[in-house]
Image: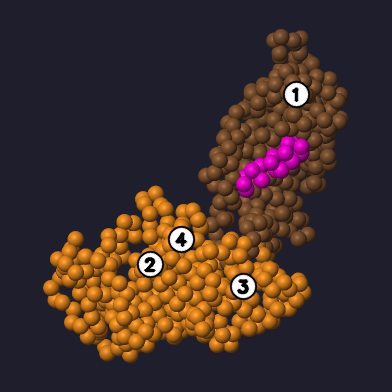
Chain colours: A brown, B orange
Amino acid sequence: MLQFIIRRLLWAIPVLFFVALVSFFLMHQAPGGPFDKDNNKKQVDGATLASLNRRFGLDKPQYINPAAASRLWASGERNPLTLGRAYLDSQFFNYVFNAMRGDLGPSYRQRGKNVQDIIFKQWPYSMRLGLLAMIFAVITGIPLGVIAALRQNSIVDYISLFFATIGVSVPTFVIGLLVIIFFGTTLKWISITNNDWNTWRPYLAPSLVLGLSTMSFITRITRSTVLEVKRQDYIRTARAKGLSERMVIVRHILRNAMIPVVTVLGPALVDLITGAVITESIFSIPGVGKFFVDAIFQRDYSMIMGSTLIYATLVVMANILVDLSYGLLDPRIRSQG
Amino acid sequence: MPPLLEVRNLKVQFKTQDGVVTAVNDVSFHLERGETLGIVGESGSGKSVTSLTLMRLIPTPPGKIAGGSIVFDGENLLDYSEEEMRHVRGNRISMIFQDPMTSLNPVLTIGRQITESLELHMKLTGAEARKRAVELLNMVGIPSGARRLDDYPHQFSGGMRQRVMIAMGLSCNPELLIADEPTTALDVTIQAQILELINRLKNETGTAVIIITHDLGVVAGMADRVAVMYAGRIVEEGPTGEIFSNPRMPYTIGLLRSIPRLDDADGRTLTPIRGLPPDLINLPAICPFSPRCDYFVAGKCDQTVPPLRPVGADHRAACLFDITLETPVPTKEPANALA
């Protein structure tokens, strides 16, 4: 078990490296840079731009720096470590080395703030919202799916299909606005402005809105896996033992049906925590989603890289958790270590 | 003493998109205590549906028990409530299924799967049930049962899993054990071991057995009596020796002619039964085997459904004519053979 966790954590290193490489590459393929001229604002003059670039290391080559290495070689340096470091004295590798030390760099656009300060300050809001949305999605989605499957083609099944289809197909901003108009403005059940996001109450409505599509997704997956498990031979065996319907469902159907459902829960949770941009802006929650999107438009390189890496780390962690719980549910996986 | 099980005029139907399938049609048979009955038939002949119906395990809908009675130990199971039926299943009647690879729950230990019915029906506590489960595993020939209780099905081979299934089936000392193709999914060498095991346990425990198979060889070694099913009906029934030495229904004759035998003279050709089993939707009221029968007589076989009639001591066959193994096959091809 411990060996499994360690192996998976070690695997995370190359994964994160390649995520960093790909996002760095894509980010630099997009035209422009963090200190571009914005025609609507005060212009940055050439000298300032050059000094800004030097200050943030953007004057260095993007991936490798052979020129620096050969300069050192010419000056008589023979230590391979020093030479290697000079060879990798580039924007990408400097970022990677700093990130490995836990320094995600300064934000290029928000003066005097580090990326990790921004992310970790906004983090708890997104985390609370995402977790609540996930809890809502799981505790309503799974039972709905199970009931729909057990009463296949009944009115319950059709009603759950109806709501699941709505949940998947209607965009969050439509549902979010409807909720604000109906429950906020008309019924005045929820407060829209001046919310204290350090208490749990204001999160209720946005987490329902955010969790709705995940809930619909979970409902449908649960339904289809329960339907499949229900037809298995071992369920017939369980019935032939004289078990009551409740015992057949709880002991034999659910545990088997949960295996595929659990696999989607991990990535879904990460999605809910990091991908709540629309919900966060509709309900004006100060989460990370908004900062991420702003960073992309502003070419705030270190902010983009930092958010992407944290997102990737979360996905890796969530997948390890999923695989661990998978092993708990399915003995066939467990024995393979 | 009344028989342990008496099935009378059982009829089971399934509603499908194409129409109503009558999977079991007017089936009657009986079983004495401690007796072994073999039910033989090809795929789709209704033998498995018959056995599931005895346990009332037919999914309803689409299935429906349309008529008849299943009198077990003097009481009609079809009158039982679902709750009463649960006390019969796994307790007084238990069942072994065809594919041991898929019939055990992959996420529960086999110990849990065996103790489940012990706790339910025999009201044993956890520890007692585990003790009994070890005994059962030893009884079915799984060595060091205590250690294997906490293993999962995937850690057992196919033959071992079928032994676990048998241990589960016999755990509550049932009066009737239904084995639905218990050896079909196993290697031939394992088949023999499993059949021998069932035979031995049957003699030790005195439980009655219904063994369902498409393999006449299995029946020959196991059953006291044989019922041959075709298109949802029993078409011949009698003592095992009689069925093999003196079959009286052309279908049974065809089945016997189509199996190879080691003691045959060299050069005997195997004669398959031509054609396919009939579609069970809207079956016309004629002899169901008549389109494939070598002895078809126009104007007779296509007029009525032949009833089971006595053709010997405790031997009944559903054929209008007295055909035996010696009756020469008419050389003239029946007119509808090409139809």
Task: Pinpoint the chain carrying mark 1.
Answer: A
Vertical relation: A58 (above or below) A63: above
Task: Pinpoint the chain carrying mark 3.
Answer: B
Where is residue B24? Give x, y as percent.
Answer: 40, 65
Viewer-closest of A49 and A73: A49
Viewer-closest of B272 and A110: B272
| First to last magenta residue range | A130-147
First reached walking from the N terminus: tag 4 or tag 2 = 2
As drawn, is B142 to the left or to the right of A131? Answer: left
Location of mark 4 (residue): B65
Where is residue A79? Give x, y as percent.
Answer: 81, 47
Which dot, 2 or 1, sits closer to the camera?
2
Q: Amino acid at mark 1?
A: Phe
State the predominant SS element of the stretch in magenta. helix
Question: Residue drawn 34% across and 56% down?
Answer: B281
Task: Pinpoint the chain carrying mark 2.
Answer: B
Vertical relation: B242 (above or below) A92: below
Q: Amino acid at mark 4?
A: Ile
Location of mark 3 (residue): B91
Where is residue B30? Give x, y as percent.
Answer: 45, 77
As drawn, is A200 to the left or to the right of B321? Answer: right
Location of mark 2 (residue): B26
Q: Is residue B3 magenta?
A: no
Q: CA distance from mark 1 to mark 4?
A: 58 Å
Question: Residue drawn 56% across and 82% down?
Answer: B207
Q: Quadrant of the C terminus of chain B?
A: bottom left
